[in-house]
Image: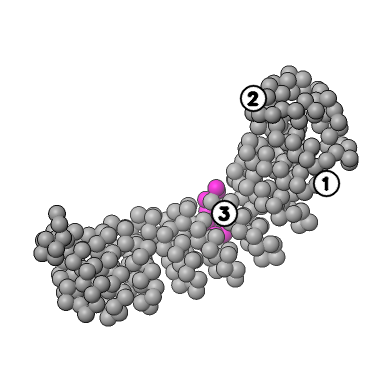
Amino acid sequence: MTTLLNRLKSCQNRAERRQAAEHINSHLEEFELMLSQVFGDDSTSIEDKLFVLDYVDFVTHSAAVTVIEYALKDDKPQVRIRGLQAAYRVRMESLNAEVKEILEDNEEVFQARKWAVHILATTDPNGYGRVLRKIARNSKEQVDLRKEAVFALTNIGDDESLGALCALLGDSEKLIRVSSAWSLSRIGSPSSINCMLAALEDEEEEVRDWAVRGLRDMDDSQALQGLADAMKLVQSGRQIRLIQLLAEKRSEIIQRAIAEMLLSTDSEVRRTAAWAMGVSPYPPAAGSLEQLLQDPDEQIREYARTALMMLGRIDPTDFGFKI
């Protein structure tokens, strides 16, 4: 064990580590010699290598590059993973060629490849977009790695990546469809409206929910009208879920569509729509809400009264409420 390594390991707190880092920064040759010994000696413990990697956040950028470069070439996956995590923290792109090799190595452990995905996506998204899209589309890859690549594409958002994400909404893997819908909802590009509207027909509720959220949050009339149209066409169970997700959207298009659900023949749909009218009051719905005061369902009547009170159409004291 080298003298410098002993000194580093003797540090008990952050302040002492900073002092040790100052010594490293002013004695880089000594530091590089220590690294060659630590990472070049097969008898060095994994713990010692990981301990040295903890100093990446304290030393100069050039010294950090040297440490991480050693780590990425280490034969122990724990060390490579910690090195990649350090590279991600400091947003280091000078080693991206090495990181790309790790990503494309099918024999590499998942955690290492996962961190490689996110390093490339955050340090040079445009330069490595093609690589990430290839991983995301490759049905022969691990599905969890494909998922990470799909998430990473939110850092790019160019036409090619949007096209890839839209295509992946039709993937056979549920996890990939869910991840793609989430990513598109985060990007919020109007160019994805049509494919997200198509995703409303997905058999998985989680895919549909993310598509709804994405369309809802775009504040785009085409997207909102698409949701309103879907609400009329789908079965009652899906109508209820749409109303729940859209209740707080104060949009004429959406509120009008929910108001129409007040006249549904399905009591659960009426109940949910009446509740939504209390969340986002809509004056044109007052007539339908007044009709619901005679509904056989007590909870529907209660929700209708609440919505009408929000609109100022009835006096809350008439129902025993104190003001």
Q: Label 1 to label 3, Cα distance in Å?
A: 28 Å
Residue indicated by mark 1? 75
Q: Label 2 to label 1, Cα distance in Å?
A: 32 Å
Compared to residue 320, the image places residue 59 above or below, namely above
Residue indicated by mark 2? 15
Q: Is residue 233 magenta?
A: no
Count of numbered labels shown in the rendering: 3
Percent position (x, y) of residue 46?
80, 42
The image quarter containing residue 96 is top right
Which span of residues is magenta-colored? 155-166
Image quadrant containing the C terminus = bottom left
**Amino acid tagged 3:** Phe
SS under mark 1: loop
Compared to residue 316, the image places residue 235 above or below, namely below
Q: Could you say which disc has been placed on residue 151 in the image?
A: 3
Could you tell me what secondary structure mostly forms the magenta stretch?
helix
